[in-house]
Image (spheres, rainbow, N blue to C red):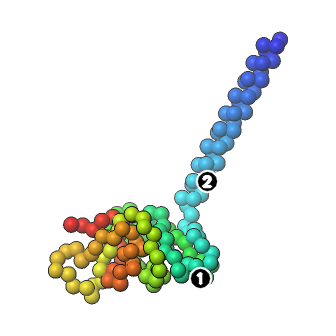
Amino acid sequence: MKREKRLKVIVISVILILILFLAAIFFSVKLLKKEAKSERYYVSDDVEFCKQIKFLCKPEYEPFSDDKGCGCRLIQNNSGDTSEKKTFCTEESRGADVCVELYMPVCGWFSSEIKCAKYPCAQTFSNSCFACSNNNVEYYTPGECPK
């Protein structure tokens, strides 16, 4: 009798643990899908603070600012081809006082007004903040510049 009771308790405990485990997996997947579908997210809701900072966005996202603050938004019509992922420097991105020392190399492509002796008319920067801080850069693409 005692043995049957213990066995029942063990079986019920295992079932409860299994239910909790499956629920955790379900909600984790649901949260990841929600995050993946998010078209924009805010880094700060302080407009004045946004004017002073430069931040990096996840791949496939670009910085933006509006009257609610600043953050990252999904790049529309992104083909997935790195050569097509041009991110143009905005006035906000040029006005950063400080850049984070984070190595996520980008190729900063110079404005057509800049004349170069050879291709590419670009320079590799450690990240997008440093690229857009250079007034010669019109836009950047992910990764180092072609040789």
The residue that disc 2 covers is 31
- CA gap between label 1 and label 2 equals 31 Å
Figure check: 77 above or below 23: below
Name the kind of residue labelled 2 in the image: Leu
Q: Residue at x 19, y 74 (%)?
A: 119
Name the side, left or right, on which 8 lies relative to 37. right
Name the kind of residue labelled 1 in the image: Glu
The residue that disc 1 covers is 48
Q: Residues within 10 Å of mark 2 (few under 14, many from 20)?
A: few
Q: Residue 15, percent across and down?
A: 71, 30
Q: Can residue 75 be seen in this view?
A: no
Looking at the image, which is closer to me, 80 or 132? 132
Q: Residue 37, percent across and down?
A: 55, 61
Q: Farthest residue in the right direction? A: 1
Q: What element carries label 1?
A: helix
Q: Farthest residue in the top direction? A: 1
Q: Which residue is drawn at 17% across and 76% down?
A: 118
Figure quadrant of the N terminus: top right
